[in-house]
Amino acid sequence: MPVTAPVVRRELAATGTVTDWKLRRDYTQVAPGVVIPTPEEHDPAAFGGFGVDCVTRVWANHLLRPDAVLAGWAAAGVYGLRPDWCDSAPVLLLCQGTSSGSTRSTVAARHPLRPVIRPLSATPDIRYPSARFPRLRVVAPEAAAAHCLWTILTGRHTWWVHDVPGMTREEVRAVQFLDAFCQCTWVTRVQILEATRGKVDRGVMEHLLALADDGAQSPMETILRLIVRDLLPQPFRWQSQIRVDLAPGASSEWSPRTLSDLGHEELKLVIYYDGAHHDAAGQTDVDFDQFHALRDLGREVLRFNKESLRSPGAVRERVLNAIDRALARVASPRPG
């Protein structure tokens, strides 16, 4: 969550602690009449054109409309969803009155200080998740998720994704969102399915939920899983976050261990997605030692990074070869 809370400009000026000249020079407007101290290296074009992060914009609009109910991507951001997705979307408020603004993020960014308004037609399930602004009313997580999924599948909110064979980019984004949102909230698949009724085709939603896995700890892990999703023969199924003790029999308190991003325990197959931090010299040494320790334990080990996922065909071929070796190893285990 942001460190600096916004303030109403006229209230700040009334304190006499900040001159009008300083307000113009050192403060940035984040909603009509609401400001924050200008961050260092502030880029007005950042955050998808909205200038500041979505939570700061949520707080600012709450000061102006304390009775409004927060919904959509900004609500998901308050619940802890990845800021890089939420920050490039508008603040959606449910209020008494008529609609204004576009839910298409690129259109809404043309007027970054204005929230998107939709009528509060029925009494929604309300939560109060903000410790900083405890009176901030927010729709339940499943309702926020339903709106986010609708904007993803209709192309109203996008982000760059790798190509995944057999899936549209909208489907890939939707599964990435489901993986991430189920990690940062207690929302269930049943709740999301019910909340999307009337917004997303039920068959489409059931398909996407079947592809989701809240064990994925990053959007790139989701991409890797989706690329290889159909490669294991029946009855085997992919498993996420498989823990492997690298020194079996050692004290549990001191035993070195690793957590693979994807794999299968019975087949002794483990797959990792290596983010940017794996390029660091110290981490490279750790990964090298870990690779050989896993091989000594009879594990089939594969590692991929962001660049390798740009060639999904090559990834699938490598994984298929590893699966064949793992199946052969299971069929003919080593003596002892």
Image (cartoon, rainbow, N blue to C red):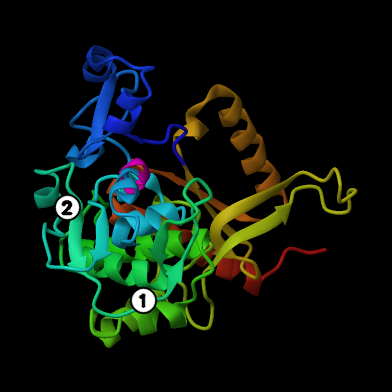
Compared across the picture, whether 53 is left or right of 105 comes to right
Secondary structure category for the residue under label 2: helix
Position of residue 153 measured from the top left corner of the image (x, y, whole percent): 21, 68
Sequence-wise first label, 2 or 1: 2
Amino acid, disc 2: Ser
Magenta: predominant secondary structure element?
Answer: helix
Amino acid, disc 1: Pro
Secondary structure category for the residue under label 1: loop
Residue drawn at (11%, 57%) of the image: 101
Q: Which residue is mark 2?
A: 105
Q: Which residues are magenta?
A: 55-59
Compared across the picture, whether 47 is left or right of 75 comes to left
Compared across the picture, whether 100 is left or right of 176 comes to left
Relative to the observer, which residue lies in front, 173 or 128? 128
Relative to the observer, which residue lies in front, 60 or 248? 60
Q: Which residue is mark 1?
A: 124
Where's the C terminus, which quadrant?
bottom right
Cβ–Cβ under 8 Å for marks 2 and 1 = no
Residue drawn at (45%, 83%) of the image: 190
